[in-house]
Amino acid sequence: MTLSVGCTARPGKSRENRTGAWRTFKPNFKHDKCTKCGICALICPESAVHENQDGFYDADYNYCKGCGLCAEECPAEDIEMTREEK
Amino acid sequence: MTQIMEGSHAVAEAVRLSKPGVISAYPITPQTHIVERLAEMVADGLLEADYITVESEFSALSACLGASATGVRVYSATTSQGLALMFEVCFNAAGMRLPLVMTIANRALSAPLSIWNDHQDSISLRDSGWLQLYAQDCQEAHDLHYIAYRVAEDHSVLLPAMVCFDGFVLTHTYEPVDIPGQEEVDAFLPAFSPYQRLDARDPISFGMYATPDYYMEFRYEMERAMQRAKGVLKECGKEFGERFGRDYSDLVESYRLEDADTALVAMGSLCGTVKDAIDEMRGEGKKVGLLNLRVFRPFPFEDVKKALSGVSRVAILDKNVSIGSKGAVGLEMRDTLYGTGIEILDCIAGLGGRDIRKRDVRRIVGLAEAGGGDIFYGLREEVL
Ligand code: SF4
Ligand code: SF4
């Protein structure tokens, strides 16, 4: 990549820029005690949590930056944050 | 056509002939006459520009920044506190590589409140990535605006430019000024051709986020552009000379330096007084000369070194001070002349409008010859 003059950017940069690389803790959606309430998807500041085909929720690790809010807010305590080694 | 006019109006004429599409400014002494005259020109239909009135200098320069990003030539003017309020926008405009041109009617900074002239305002923005040109008379103040636009807008430069001229000493002084015709100006300064611009059909954002992996490289690119500006300034200054008969191909002006032992170094209107003092001293057999720094950013290291290669000592008239250190020009000169053995005397002088007269210039030459250290020149010891 060569630098743009004036640090300009075209639209779509946040798609290209995989902010998941910032993560040090990873949320593990265990689908065990989960009541499918959907709070994790609502609370995620990156909108990285999506409902899967079974009605459970999973994080998109390309964009989940590991803030832990989903785990903190999950009423069923079904999301576990674990340190991610890279 | 040569006309007798106030410095501020000479600048307003240069702006009119440069045909900016957007002007935004906030009135402040001693810049007011420039922007008042431009407002009149727009109201009278003499200048087809959008004149955006704003509530502060911060907004004025922000409006110019936004307008420039849409691909239009822009203009602003300010001084002192107004420039201080623009601080953040100045760095942004340079980092976004937008070729704004702004006149600085140089004035001291508060506190204490002073409406009088020194160079503290623009010098305090020396690190902002703007070119800085200093005019020594009203004609130069007029001419340098055309050159500023040409160089700033050159695609190998793309940095904003300040044209600095001394508040009151030049802004409010009437001098004969040669005002070229529109066709002549158009031939030298064609319509603005933006490198890139905001366009809803082809979206782009300016001045985005740079992580530590990239920030330094962006700053380095600005430095490289600033260095390229030296060559572009010389070329444009030469072409200006060929077209209009006033040559600006040198970044510094040498006056009677050929065989000089002592060189004075100054910027702006003070150079006129220094030249008169030099003529007197030359009449008495003293070998003195002047180096006028017309361009302070980019700092013309090579040109200064060359111009001063024959002198034994240099006395700098610094109309600014970095409190806790020295004058800004003095520091640059020490860097430039390091290792040459040339003695350097840095005089902080003329702050807040204190006159520097011919007799002061003579005294400063005497101090340099006596080999004294750096000083605040002309302090009123009785009030300290
Ligand atoms: S850790 Fe933060 S970013 Fe990742 S899924 Fe949970 S709320 Fe979203
Ligand atoms: S917040 Fe917890 S319980 Fe609710 S859907 Fe998400 S993981 Fe399941």
Image (spheres, rainbow, N blue to C red):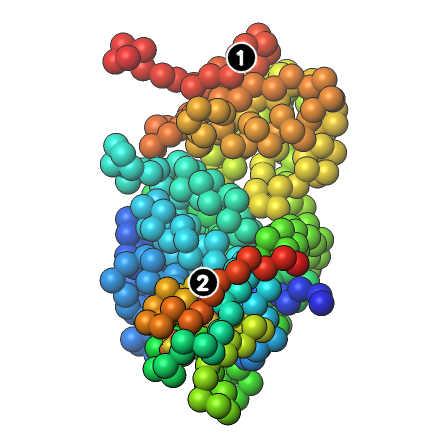
Q: Position of residue B287 (x, y in %)?
A: 65, 19
Disc on res. B373 = 1
Q: Is residue B188 above or below residue B344?
A: below
Chain designation of label 1? B
Circle 1 — which element? loop
Which residue appears farthest toward the front when viewing the image? A32
On the same chain, marks 2 and 1? The answer is no
Residue B271's spot in the image, x, y percent? Answer: 51, 35
Q: Callout 2: 10 Å neighbours few (<14), some, many (20+)?
A: some
Instruction: Give amino acid for label 2.
Output: Cys
Relative to B240, is B308 above or below?
A: above
Say which quarter of the image contains residue A41. bottom left
Percent x, y of residue B92 = 47, 58
Whether residue A71 is visible to the viewer of this picture, yes or no, is: yes
Q: Which residue is located at x 31 percent, y 76 percent?
A: B44
Given residues B166 and B242, the one toward you in this image is B166
Q: Is mark 1 within 8 Å of ligand 1?
A: no
Q: Nearer the viewer, mark 2 or mark 1?
A: 2
Q: Amino acid at mark 1?
A: Gly
In the picture of the structure, the residue carrying the numbered disc 2 is A67
> Which residue occupies 49% across, 28% down?
B327
Q: Quadrant of residue B122?
A: top left
Q: Is mark 2 within 8 Å of ligand 1?
A: yes
For the point 27% across and 34% down, the residue is B111
In-image side of B302 versus B298 (left or right): right
Left or right for B113, reference B326: left
Q: Residues within 10 Å of mark 1 (few under 14, many from 20)?
A: few
Q: Is residue B380 above or below residue B354?
A: above
Can you say which quadrant of the picture contains the C terminus of chain B?
top left
Q: In front here: A77 or A83?
A: A77
